[in-house]
Amino acid sequence: GAVVSQHPSRVICKSGTSVKIECRSLDFQATTMFWYRQFPKQSLMLMATSNEGSKATYEQGVEKDKFLINHASLTLSTLTVTSAHPEDSSFYICSARDGYSNQPQHFGDGTRLSIL
Amino acid sequence: GENVEQHPSTLSVQEGDSAVIKCTYSDSASNYFPWYKQELGKRPQLIIDIRSNVGEKKDQRIAVTLNKTAKHFSLHITETQPEDSAVYFCAASEMNTGFQKLVFGTGTRLLVSP
């Protein structure tokens, strides 16, 4: 149980393109979803936290207008990287948690984003 | 905010040896400390976690210890195997209802040689 599905797994696109990444909880209600970014050989850095039906809370230094997060249902959150540039190339990972349980968050498989 | 430091950054051991990775945290309110194993290009996988009401937890070859007073916790892997080779991350969080904001350590690259 507790599966989080993230799509796509790999995106290669031109500079200036907007890219949408989906994160779905398949068998539990994700009251809270987290989006992380991981550069090569570095740790996971939290970008934002979203609670279902509320606006996302962004970490310091993360541009909310560039990284649009939507968490409209208890099973789906999306991250849109708007007007992506080469410096946005990274590994983006979502995680989800059922806040009404005492269980840890569960991670998706990640999306490798490459901007040319 | 919380700050988590992790050492060493790389660790090379021979198969069968033990490996120890240490982390320190800064926020005394943190009460949940998970450890993740991440293989290249894959998701982090939770391998063990500990809550602040417990000082030690063990699961087969893996154990975690927590010293709340000193604000540090450690991962111990015994009888290491080549398949244990990966990057390991510690994390700290204040775990309350509906929220679990994880702050990760910088990671330890473990290499187990046959």
Image (cartoon, rainbow, N blue to C red):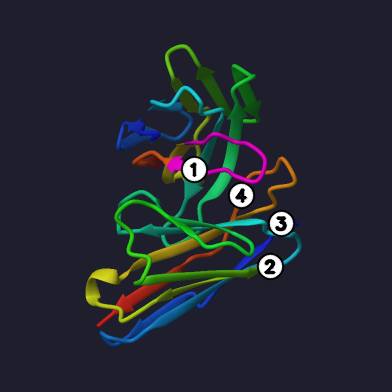
Picture quadrant where residue B71 is located:
top left
| Residue wearing tag 2 | A75
Q: Position of residue A11 (x, y in %)?
A: 40, 80
Taking depth in this image into account, of B34 and A63 the one nearest to the observer is: A63
Picture quadrant where residue B6 is located:
top left
How far separated are the C-alphas under marks 3 and 1? 18 Å
Question: Which amino acid type corresponds to the residue marked 3 in the rendered image?
Answer: Ala
How far separated are the C-alphas under marks 1 and 4? 9 Å
Label 1 chain ID: B
Q: Residues within 10 Å of mark 2 (few under 14, many from 20)?
A: many
* Residue contact between numbered discs 1 and 4, judged by CB atoms under 8 Å: yes
* Residue contact between numbered discs 4 and 2, judged by CB atoms under 8 Å: no
Q: Is residue A59 left or right of residue A94?
A: left
How far separated are the C-alphas under marks 4 and 2? 14 Å
Q: Position of residue A57 (x, y in %)?
A: 47, 56
Judged from this view, the residue extending furthest toward the top is: B69
For marks 3 and 1, give the one nearer the viewer: 1
Q: Position of residue B30 (x, y in %)?
A: 51, 29
**Residue B102's mark?**
1
Give the prevailing secondary structure in the magenta stretch: loop
Is B96 in the magenta?
yes
Task: Point out the image quarter for the N terminus of chain A.
Answer: bottom right
Picture quadrant where residue A63 is located:
bottom left
Taking depth in this image into account, of B74 and B5 the one nearest to the observer is: B5
| Residue wearing tag 3 | A2
How far separated are the C-alphas under marks 3 and 4? 9 Å
Which residue does the image show at 69% across and 43% down from the upper left?
A103
Question: Which amino acid type corresponds to the residue marked 4 in the rendered image?
Answer: Gln
Which residue does the image show at 50% across and 39% down from the upper left?
B81
**What secondary structure is found at the residue carrying circle 1?**
loop
Q: Residues within 10 Å of mark 1 (few under 14, many from 20)?
A: many
* Residue contact between numbered discs 3 and 2, judged by CB atoms under 8 Å: no
